[in-house]
Amino acid sequence: GGSTQWVDANSDDTKKLTVNSISTIGGNVYAGTDKGMYLTRNDGGAWSICGNGLPASPKVLCSMVKGNTLYAGLETSGIFESSSYGSTWSSKNSGLKMAKIHVLSMYREGNVYFAGTDGAGVYISVDKGASWNSSNFGLPAKGKIKTFIKKQNHLVLKTKWFLCLCGSQKSGERRIFN
């Protein structure tokens, strides 16, 4: 069989950045970093910052794509959306209760979006991120929601200390494992 070779896709501008998330739309690759959202249109040949509308020096912790819309979860500024391939961004924080919410992870199931936070649990949006509602029944208090994955009919989320099996579509059960 053939072998696969990894190739460095960094420019001098991006070699010193911490990359927290990667998302793609078509041929565009977006890297959420400690210094903002970066974009390459040529497989890493050149990277540019794409942050018009984001707060100054945003730390992008996670990102998610739905169609041609990119969502970014920021360390202290909540959730932002771009439907212009990263050219412009708008805040999508309606319903998020903390002034400086840390969005650590994002996940979508159809048109239902989930945001995992640092200390405020899980938020759910049923209107493409226009508004958010807290959904923490059965979760550890002030959990850091680090990861979401889909396992059959369950949404599994990982906190710092727990794995939670949430929202079985068959019975609505919620279980917490530690």
Image (cartoon, rainbow, N blue to C red):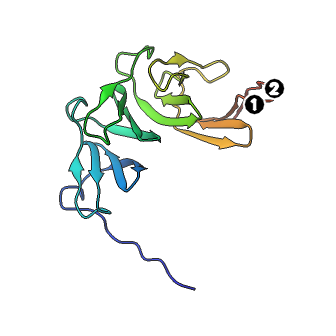
Relative image position of residue 6 (x, y in whole percent): 40, 72
Please name whichever residue, 177 or 171, is drawn nearer the observer in this view of the structure.
Answer: 171
Q: Specify the amino acid type for callout 1.
A: Ser
Figure check: 116 above or below 141 = below
* Point 63% across, 23% down: residue: 139
The residue tagged 2 is 171
Label 2 near label 1: C-beta < 8 Å? Answer: yes
Relative image position of residue 26 (x, y in whole percent): 40, 53
Cα–Cα span, label 1 and label 2:
6 Å
Relative image position of residue 23 (x, y in whole percent): 42, 48
Relative image position of residue 14 (x, y in whole percent): 23, 55
Quarter holding the N terminus is: bottom right
Q: Secondary structure at mark 2?
A: loop
Left or right, 107 with respect to 93, comes to right
Figure check: 2 above or below 148 = below
Asked if residue 160 shows in the view, the reply is no
Quarter holding the C terminus is: top right
Q: Secondary structure at mark 1?
A: loop
Determine crowd level at label 2: few under 14, some 14-19, many 20+ residues with C-alpha closer than 10 A. Answer: few
Please name whichever residue, 104 or 177, is drawn nearer the observer in this view of the structure.
Answer: 104
Left or right, 160 with respect to 166, comes to left
* Point 49% across, 35% down: residue: 106
Q: Residue furthest bottom?
A: 1
Q: Specify the amino acid type for callout 2.
A: Ser
Please name whichever residue, 26 or 148, is drawn nearer the observer in this view of the structure.
Answer: 26
Please name whichever residue, 171 or 141, is drawn nearer the observer in this view of the structure.
Answer: 171
The residue tagged 1 is 168
* Point 21% across, 50% down: residue: 48
- Please tell me the numbered disc located at residue 144: none
